[in-house]
Image (cartoon, rainbow, N blue to C red):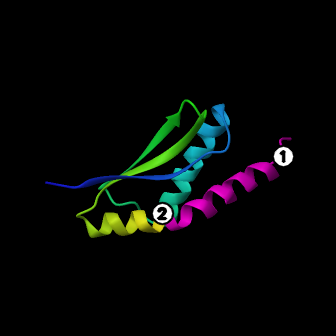
Amino acid sequence: MTRTFRVSLGNSSLTGKQAVDLVRQFRHQLCSLHKKPDLVSLVTVEDVEARCRGVVAFYDADNPCSAEWVKQAEALRAELWQMLAARRKCAVRE
């Protein structure tokens, strides 16, 4: 039997298509920093009341590799969301 845990990795500050794009970039950046184990699932969630999208990690707590990856992701999440939001603000369409 496995113990599956759910951990929120944060929400996008944007709405609509911009939120979808930012969440996709967040997931991509997170997985490029540390290779995601197969036993970790990153799921995009939508909060209808707050009108935002976020990322939730589901993982097997009995697997030390998965638990360590989620712990690292939790430590990086705030900085990564800020970096992506700042990068988006600096982007200029030509």
Type of amino acid at the residue the image marks with label 1: Val
Mark 1: few/some/many CA within 10 Å (<14, 14-19, 20+): few
Closer to the camera: disc 1 or disc 2?
Answer: 2
36 vs 86, nearest the viewer: 86
**Left or right relative to 42: residue 60:** left
**Residue in view at x 32 percent, y 53 percent:** 5
52 vs 64, nearest the viewer: 52
**Left or right relative to 82: residue 32:** left
81 vs 34, nearest the viewer: 81
Relative to 12, does residue 51 appear above or below in the rendering?
above
* Position of residue 13 measured from the top left corner of the image (x, y, whole percent): 67, 44
Q: Quadrant of residue 49?
A: top right
49 vs 39, nearest the viewer: 49
Q: In the rendered structure, which segment of residues is drawn in magenta?
A: 73-94
Tag 2's secondary structure?
helix
Q: Main secondary structure of the magenta part?
A: helix
Q: Which residue is mark 2?
A: 73
* Position of residue 94 measured from the top left corner of the image (x, y, whole percent): 86, 41
From mark 1 to mark 2, how far is it between C-alphas? 29 Å
